[in-house]
Image (cartoon, helix red, strand yellow):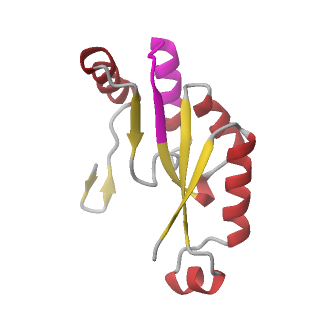
Amino acid sequence: MIIGKKFRSRSPENVVDEMEELVYKYGVRNISFLGDIFMLNKRRAPAIADEIKNRNIDLSFVTSSRVDTVNRELLEHLKSACMSTLYCGVESGSQRVLDLMGKGITLKRAEDAMKVTKKCGINVMGSFIL
């Protein structure tokens, strides 16, 4: 949740409480975390994965990330909690356009993020601004 200029996140336990309700009360088996900040906090994302595993919740989830926050260790941790797909914000196939947009990423970084995601056995999809 964003309040003014400050981001406040729900606790991993609270997030997984809601996931658990969706699974057991409504039969949901696939959940998507939308927004590119899920993987930004390197403690919170693994804590959510740990909570899912500790509760043995039968689901698969999808999340999004900026390409510059993707790393193998985190991906493997999330995969162990049944993350199936990662949407990467590539935004453009042109470095010139990325620079003009002020994205602060390179095409090489985007390519590397997608390669490491695939190597972890996670489906990866690029999102682009057209």
Q: Position of residue 93 (x, y in %)?
A: 62, 75
Quadrant containing the C terminus is bottom left
Q: Residue at x 59, y 83 (%)?
A: 99
- Name the image quarter holding residue 68: bottom right
Q: Position of residue 71 (x, y in %)?
A: 68, 47
Left or right of residue 46: residue 17: left
| Of 48 and 3, the residue lying toward us | 48
Q: Position of residue 25 (x, y in %)?
A: 24, 16
- Name the image quarter holding residue 110: bottom right
Q: Residue at x 40, y 53 (%)?
A: 35
Is the residue 68 above or below the residue 117 in the image?
Answer: below
Is the residue 36 above or below the residue 43 in the image?
Answer: below
Q: Position of residue 66 (x, y in %)?
A: 54, 58
Is the residue 100 above or below the residue 68 in the image?
Answer: below
| Of 125 and 40, the residue lying toward us | 125
| Residue 6 included in the magenta stretch of the image | no
Q: Which residues are magenta?
A: 47-62
Q: Residue at x 68, y 55 (%)?
A: 113
Q: Residue at x 25, y 21 (%)?
A: 26
